[in-house]
Image (spheres, helix red, strand yellow):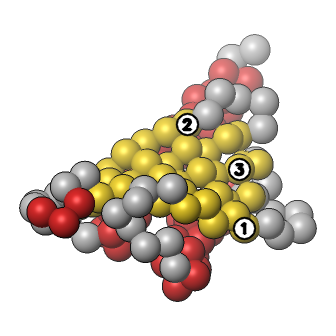
Amino acid sequence: MTNLNRYEENAMHIQINTDSNIDGTEELATHVKGVVESALSRFSDRITRVEVHLSDQNSDKGGQDDKRCMMEARLEGRQPTAVTHLAASLDDAVDGAADKLKRSIESTLERLKDARKTR
């Protein structure tokens, strides 16, 4: 398991983990970080950490939708929000998971906003 940590001052922490079937290159880390930051930028002040787990379900065998991306975001004062996306390529798996995570966080924050209005 490769762990590619990203620390930036005053920014959400992005941790990228790969299984033994994925080459955890700096190029991959830069790409994943860019996708996550782009998808979640408007929430970055509310997110303390995002963990990304990349895996190849079938290893060398190949197969359709065998690349898996699981993302977990930690919102301040909330339980973690996690999503998973399977795709034929790592790029598609990361893009799909980032989109799902963005929609999930939007929904969570909207529910919190509505709950405050009814008080």
* Residue 6, numbered label: 1
Q: Is residue 20 above or below residue 77?
A: below
Circle 3: element type = strand
Where does residue 33 sit, x and y in percent of width and height? 59, 71
Residue 63 placement (x, y as % from top left): 10, 61
- Residue 25 horizontal/vertical position (percent): 52, 79
Look at the numbered disc 2 and give the secondary structure of its residue: strand
Residue kind at label 1, given as amino acid type? Arg
- Residue positioned 19% across, 66% down in the render: 60
Q: From the image, tell me which residue sits under label 2.
A: 81
Point out the frontmost of discs 2 and 1. 1
Earlier in the chain: of badge 2 and badge 3, it is 3
**Residue most extreme to the right:** 9
As measured in the structure, the alpha-carbon distance from the residue carrying label 2 to the one carrying label 3 is 11 Å
Looking at the picture, tell me which residue is in the foreground, 36 or 21: 21
Q: Residue flagged by tag 2: what amino acid is it?
A: Thr
Q: Quadrant of residue 45?
A: bottom right
Give the alpha-carbon distance from disc 3 to disc 1, as whole Å: 10 Å
Q: Say which of marks 3 and 1 sits in front.
A: 1
Q: Earlier in the sequence, mark 2 or mark 1?
A: 1
Q: Which residue is mark 3?
A: 49
50 on left or right of 46: left
Whether residue 54 is visible here, answered yes or no, is: no
Q: Residues within 10 Å of mark 3 (few under 14, many from 20)?
A: some
The CA span between labels 2 and 1 is: 20 Å
